[in-house]
Amino acid sequence: MHSILINKNINTAHFLQKILTLLFSVSTFLTLSPYFTWNLPYYFRFFCILAILTFFIYTIHGGKLKKNGIWLSILFFIIIFSLSLSSKNETLFNGSVFFILFFLCLPDFLKLNIFNVFKIIYAISLLPGLIYFFLILFGLGGNWEIILPLNPLKNTEGLYYRVYYGMVILSNQIYSISTGEIFRFSAMYDEPGVVGTVSALILAASGFNLKRKINKIILLSGILSFSLAFYISIFIFLIFKPKILLKITSITTITIFISLSSLKNVSLIQYYVFDRFSLILNGFDKVDNRISLCFQNYFSDFLNHKDTFWGLGYNAYTLTDCDVSSYITLIYDFGFFGFFLILIFYSLLSFSISNNFIKKDIFIRWLPMILVYLANIYQRPTVFDPWSIVILCGGLIYSIKDSRINSCSK
């Protein structure tokens, strides 16, 4: 009788782990804001609430939590509370923050499972757009509808989105060619940079393992996004991951670039590939468009402001109506003290995953992932976005697991 109860509890625990993984993974995907959620934000809230309720049921049934993860969650709460003190207009305590608070408490194997399932969902979300990309390339795209962007700056510029089944295209990202149209691939997300950034981070977190078909889909999507951040991420891996598989990938990527020479006169290829790479050779600042002159002026005034230490409050940078996507918005919003707290949190997050972070083999495996992550934070400061936290944790845990497997096989 006792053994039957034990088996029943084990089966219940496994079932709850699967449900927990699925709910957290779907919630993570929804924080990428696919186009069908733009006017329906309750999608994320619904799945996030279900995930948190399942979390409590999981713990009631004896589900194990990570002890230092609980302490890290408490620290994260304190940091968010501290940053909220300077926020006059908006609160930081939203669904994303509560998601992160509970996610941090989960054991590493569940964090890795959530990352893996999220990666599958993300790859599936790319497939309709990839099919449409090649259909539209040859003039076979079919009918589409129009939706307006949520971003007020895009609305001011008169931009709109073409909507296909499972894909959107921003109107200023479309270029005519002899056979049809070519465009920067954004799948079902609001801009190509999202695909470039997320794809680069997932590939980095997966150790750039192209033996899996899912990663090949993600690689192709990143290339077609014509995202500079994505290409730089590949370059970082070329330096720090000189493995045979990576060399093959690099050769494949270079071959694609060479084949694009026949499309050099197409303005999309000309600007986003040839011109931007030639500008990088003359200095990165010439191609860095993450900070507009408008925001540079605001930030210069801020540095002489009395609130430099505490910042001007959460999302204060949006009140400037300037085009900016850079880490300096974190300083502008939360001050140098808040920026320091964020760095402390991410450092402790890394240590919580491995107490052996200073070991050479772990450090070498983590370095490319961390550099890619920092490069993307520079141009897209998503430090409080669940998808960003999930990818980072998944990547660091995967590196340790992969390191142990390789050690055992030697």
Image (tube, grey):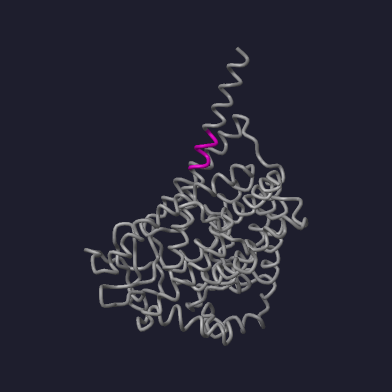
Q: Is residue 381 visible?
A: yes
Would you say 295 lies left or right of 221 here? right
- Callout count: 0
Q: Is residue 85 visible?
A: no
Residue nearest the observer in this picture, 82 or 366? 366
Would you say 189 lies left or right of 380 here? left
Image quadrant assignment for residue 60: top right
Q: Position of residue 175 (x, y in %)?
A: 32, 77
Q: Residue at x 45, y 74 (%)?
A: 257
Looking at the image, the residue that sits furthest to the top is: 1
Q: Position of residue 335 (x, y in %)?
A: 66, 71
Q: Residue at x 55, y 67 (%)?
A: 234
Q: Is residue 140 above or below residue 288?
A: above
Q: Main secondary structure of the magenta part?
A: helix
Query: Which span of residues is magenta-colored?
Result: 16-22
Residue nearest the observer in this picture, 322 or 394? 394
Q: Residue at x 68, y 42 (%)?
A: 66
Q: Is residue 108 above or below residue 203?
A: above
